[in-house]
Amino acid sequence: MISYQMVEHGKPLQKVLATTPRPQGTEVLVRVTRAGVCHSDLHIWEGYFDLGGGKRFYVKERGCIPPFTLGHEPLGVVEALGPRARGVKVGQKRLVYPWIGCGKCAVCKAGQENYCVSGTRFLGVNRPGAYATHMLVPDPKYLVDIGGIEDSFAATLACSALTAYSAAHKLPPVGAKDEVAVLGCGGLGLIGISVLREKGVKNIIACDVDDAKLAVATKLGAKRTVNTRAADAAQQLQGIAGAIDFVGAAATATLGIGALRKGGRYVICGLYGGELVHPLPPIAQRAIGIIGSYVGNLQELKEVVALAKKKKLKPLPVETRPAGEANAALEDLKSGRIVGRIVLDFEKVDE
């Protein structure tokens, strides 16, 4: 098998040839055909998350130690089964759910593996991921049929669409005239607009610093847009019922929370970094909610896929690139040159 491995944080990924693993027990060997490139990959590649105030959380503390294979948006074909694997057949195309928990803690048993206490089996985060021709999946139950969905778009469902879907469900009830702000119109925010529209939100405000991304957001269904570099950006957002922060920076948090009406809710799922300093009394006085949302659970992914199959999610712009361009993809994403999502094509990789 071939993988594009992070051999040192912040350095170019290296093409590595290794023996293809054999599935054991309930494991499934998946031949990867598509792998989405996510902004979280950048943080893992760089080796840390910014906690603000000069503090950092280093991914090595969660077991992500080079050499390591990134990629948590895998789509592929079942190539081999362990002796106890049931429910899929060799040759079937499947989307891989990557947020795999220990399966033993109370959180996992409640169906929330993405919130697992240990969180040590997330594919592409602390277990080998999808920037490879092959990957092992612990159990067939983490494979989802995506028949009828275009491959590259399907690959983005396991993270970007799932994250947006789970975050949208954490908003308060929204009336016909209520406005919801989408903070950040990258790959997450753009599919978030589509998710919110399907959820029945009619008045979506797309917010970004890039007018090109705002133009795409309008095409996908945003009612109006706000360039957050504008001096009056905060005033343009006042009175919103909710905000989903797909950036997760100090500036977007301050903007979103400050614009909420009484009883509004701010949902953060972006991981750009920084820290929030906010006076406490107004949180109670305004009865606002501040809640975090991290990816989504397996059931939510199945619901997202069902929506995509019914054409109820309008696809965001997706650029498919050869797998060998993984480094360029990370650099382009880091520089902000990407509108939508990059997906790597592993079908033509020569071993």
Image (spheres, rainbow, N blue to C red):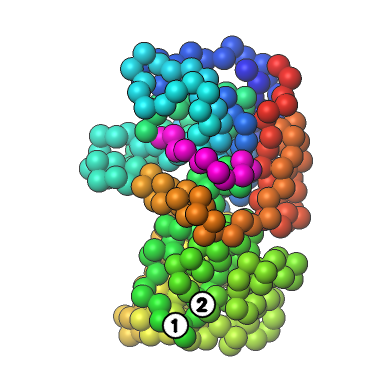
Q: Is residue 8 above or below residue 148?
A: above
Spot occupied by residue 45 in the image (x, y as percentages of width and height): 62, 39
Q: Which residue is mark 1?
A: 176
- Mark 2 lies on residue: 202
Residue drawn 45% across the image and 50% down it: 306
- Residue 331 in the figure: left or right of residue 110: right
Regarding residue 254, the answer to whether it shows in the image is no
Distance in Å between CA atoms under marks 2 and 1: 7 Å
Amino acid on which the number 2 mark rests in the picture: Lys
Q: Is residue 204 visible?
A: yes
> Based on the displayed image, in which of its 4 quarters is residue 85 positioned?
top left
Q: Position of residue 349 (x, y in %)?
A: 72, 24
Tell me, yes or no, whether the two marked residues, 2 and 1, touch with CB atoms within 8 Å: yes
The disc, 2 or 1, on the residue closer to the chain's N-terminal end is: 1
Viewer-nearest residue: 102 or 60: 102
Instruction: Classify residue 284 as left or right of residue 204.
Output: left
Crowd band around label 1 with a 10 angstrom C-alpha radius: few (<14), some (14–19), many (20+): few
Q: Residue at x 73, y 26 (%)?
A: 348
Q: In the rendered view, tell whether residue 146 sits above or below residue 309.
A: above
- Amino acid identity at mark 1: Ala
Q: Residue 181's x, y, as percent?
A: 53, 74
Q: Where is residue 169 drawn, in percent x and y?
A: 39, 63
Q: Secondary structure at mark 2?
A: loop
Is 104 magenta? The answer is no
Span colored in magenta? 142-152
Disc 1 secondary structure class? loop
